[in-house]
Image: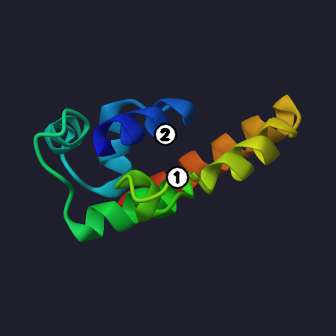
Amino acid sequence: MFGERLAELRKLNDDTQQILADKIGFSVWAVRAWEQEKNLPPSDALLAICKLYGTSADYLLGLTDIDPSDEARKQRQRLTEEEQNEMHRYEEYLLWKRKK
């Protein structure tokens, strides 16, 4: 269940496994293993994923079927294309700044 939900959230946010790995500071092999349900992420990775995608650990772990990121996704869809592009540029800037 965790792997399916992680992959779904990642794809909904237009992230590849490599991009997710870079954003949370883990290897792409770790992300692949989580999505293939070979193991679960450590607590710091789980927390980073929840913050990144605006969801809860309960949802990712299958303790609830209510995904808090659904509402955020609906709000993002209401933005104009220009506003979405601006948000994406800002996100890229923040990721770049974080690496420095």
Tell me where residue 66 appears, x and y as whole percent: 58, 53
| Residue 97 visible in image | no
Tell me where residue 98 appears, x and y as whole percent: 43, 62
Q: 48 or 61, which is in the foreground?
A: 61
Tell me where residue 40 appears, x and y as whole percent: 18, 53
| Residue 32 visible in image | yes
Instruction: Check disc 1 and give the amino acid type.
Output: Tyr
Quarter in which the N terminus is drawn: top left
Q: Is residue 28 found left or right of 62 in the rendered image?
A: left
Q: 70 or 75, which is in the foreground?
A: 70
* Res 62 label: none
Quadrant hosting residue 28: top left
Which residue corresponds to the image point at 57% horizontal and 58% vertical from the top-left? Answer: 54
Q: How many marks?
A: 2
Q: Which residue is mark 1?
A: 53
Q: Are marks 1 and 2 in contact (CB under 8 Å)?
A: yes
Q: 90 or 43, which is in the foreground?
A: 43
* Residue 36 vertical placement versus 88 (above, below): above
Instruction: Check disc 2 and give the amino acid type.
Output: Leu
> Which colour scheme appears in the figure?
rainbow
